[in-house]
Each structure stands twice: as structure tokens, then as C-alpha cells.
Amino acid sequence: MNAENELCAQRIETLCKKLMVSLHEWGYRSFSAREQVLLEVKRLLNYYKDEEIKITVIGHSLGAALAVLSAYDIAEVRLNVIGDGDERVPMTVFSFTGPRIGNLKFKERCEELGMKVLRVVNVHDVVPTMPGIITNEKFRFQKYIKDALSFPWSYANVGIEIALDHRESLFVKGNVDLVSAHNLEVHLHLVDGYHGKEKRFCLASKRDIALVNKSCDFLSLLHCTMIELKTVQLL
């Protein structure tokens, strides 16, 4: 090993030791993940107390469920309340293809706390439909079943839903691949081309469509070929 590589290895080792010390002091020994999130939010709110503040929580899949729970937790413990009054810092959640996480009372409580939730889903993805396949917020008599029968498997989504359809994009395959239909990059691609219900799919930014295939094989064969040709030209 030459001197340059040895110096690099020493720096990496020192960095790893510092990281382990930090994890031990702030993570493993003292606080749960929930406590760390609440403490950090509290610190940031205090740091920017003289500015206009908004709280935005974003997540995908399980992360989307955690995003809603985290936002609910922040609002429920009144961490976003300004001073001693009832004025609240606006709270927004962007949920990408997350599952249902609570019942009708949880949904109602989130609305009471002023949470704004935007759920982005692919209509061919099964994850946002679970749990609550039997009774959910789309079922007309959900409240009656909950109150009269105390039905335990009644779930309700929180917020407003944007329902996207990957079959409207000419860039991706038209088949129903359940894994790819749940992929975050696919959802970001669909959001990029979405301009409203029943409107033509048209990409609005220069976001590289090759990102769709970052962790799945969902681009149409035609566009895969075009990307390969473009790569060859660049080389």
C-alpha cells in the first residue's frame, strides 16, 4: 500500500470511529427514532421561530405510513403549536403509494389536527388498497358498521388522493407488473406527466426517463433502445 492509499484508509477509519461514537451517544443509548424526530423538529422550529415556517413530511410505501404517523405525532403532542395560543404551523404530508394505517376515528382526528395529506398512488398498485379490503373509506356504510358492529378490520385513508395510471405513459410497459407499479421512480415519472384527470400525459420537466429503470425493468423497449443509442452517441 502506497502512502496516499494508507492516508486515505486512516481517514476512513477515523471517520467510521467518529460515526460509531455519534450513533452510540445519540441513537443506541438514549433516544428512540420517534424521540429523535420530535427533538429535531422542535430544534428546527425554535431555530427558525422568527421566519414563516411549514412542516412537510414525505415518504414512500412503508415510509409513507411513517410519514403520516410522524406528522400525526407532531400535531398530537402540539409540537407545531406557536406559543401558548392555538395557532399551528401548517403541516403537509406527501404520501407515495402508502398503505392505510388507521381506522375512521384516526382519519377524523388527523383532520381535526389540521393535517393536509396528499396521497399519490398508481391505480394498478395493490399496496394503497390494504389493509381494509373488506371495509374502507370508499364503502358507503363504513361508519354504520364501525358504530353498530364494532368491526375491527375497518380502515380509512387520510387526505386527498391523486390516482395515476402507468398505462397512460408511452414511456413504460403497459403490463401490470405489481413490483414495478409500486416503484417510487415510476410514481415520480407519472407525476411529471400528470396534468389533471382525463388530460393528456405529457412530461413537464427534463427529468431523465432512464430513472424509471433505476431499480426495475419497466421502460418500454422502444425507449430503452433510444436511451442506449443516446449513450453510445455520448461515448
Image: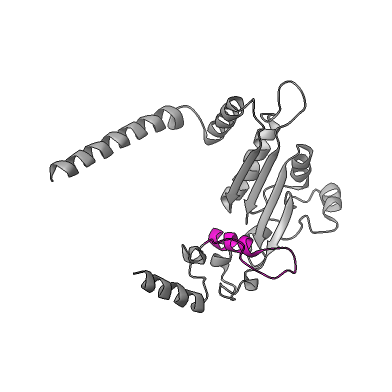
Residue 5 lies in quadrant: top left
Is 19 on the left or on the right of 185, as rendered? left
Does 175 lie within the magenta span?
A: no
Give the residue furthest to the front. Answer: 234
Q: Residue at x 76, y 56 (%)?
A: 136
Residue 173 visible in the picture: yes
Near-viewer residue (200 or 122)? 200
Q: Residue at x 74, y 20 (%)?
A: 84
Q: Is the stretch drawn in magenta largely helix, strand or loop?
A: loop
Q: Is residue 47 above or below residue 195?
A: above
Q: Is residue 78 above or below residue 13?
A: above
Give the residue furthest to the left. Answer: 2
Q: Residue at x 60, y 47 (%)?
A: 58
Residue 155 visible in the picture: no
Give the residue furthest to the top. Answer: 84
Does 201 lie within the magenta span?
A: yes
Q: Residue at x 61, y 28 (%)?
A: 45
Q: Measured from the top left, where is residue 169 in percent x and y?
A: 61, 71
Q: Measured from the top left, where is residue 165 in percent x and y?
A: 66, 68
Near-viewer residue (153 or 136)? 136
Near-viewer residue (79 or 29)? 79
Q: Measured from the top left, where is residue 116 in percent x and y?
A: 72, 44
Span shown in magenta: 183-207
Residue 7 lies in quadrant: top left
